[in-house]
Image: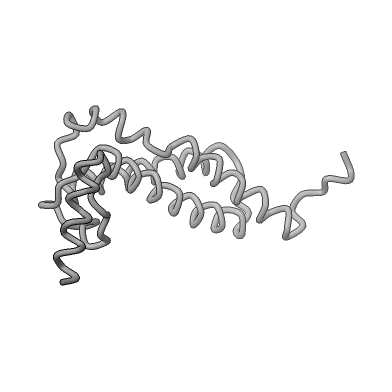
Amino acid sequence: MKDKKSKKLQQQQLQNGHSAPFKLGNLFDPDASWDKDQLGDVLHWMRQLVALVCGLTWGAIPLVGGFWLMLYLGLSTAIAYAYYALILKVDEEEYGGHGALLQEGLFASITLFLFRVVLNRWCRGGFDLASS
């Protein structure tokens, strides 16, 4: 009975223009079908996770300078590319090309990365805001 209700609910959602519910098992399944918005959301949140981890690490070690920012950008972009091209094996042209997929969540993740680096350094006493 529960299966009938859940299937009926899914069919109603699809008819109303809603997408099917997301399952974590689809994250590493190359045979799963991806909606453009779903793939964009996964890439966006993946970049946010990388930004959070790298920002905490860079801020804790006190790595500063443009080199480390560029290293983060390269690492974040490489992870996003490897995910959609090598793990999911999606046809990037269906989703707007490499540029659209690689841009997903990029600017928000840069902001989060820089925020975490500065906040972590500030909390540890790495910046003296009173002397300026």
Q: Nearer the viewer, residue 19 or 5?
A: 5
Left or right relative to 127: residue 1? left
Q: Which quarter of the picture shows residue 40?
A: top left
Q: How is the image coloured?
A: one colour
Image position, residue 18 (x, y; %): 27, 43
Q: Quadrant of the N terminus?
A: bottom left
Q: Quadrant of the C terminus?
A: top right
Q: At 23% from the left edge and 50% from the top edge, which residue is drawn?
A: 20
Q: At 63% from the left edge and 54% from the top edge, which residue is drawn?
A: 62
Total numbered badges shown on the rendered structure: 0
Furthest residue toward bottom: 1
Q: At 20% from the left edge and 53% from the top edge, which residue is drawn?
A: 10
Q: Nearer the viewer, residue 25 or 111?
A: 25
Image position, residue 49 (x, y; %): 44, 54
Q: Which quarter of the picture shows residue 73?
A: top left
Furthest residue toward left: 31
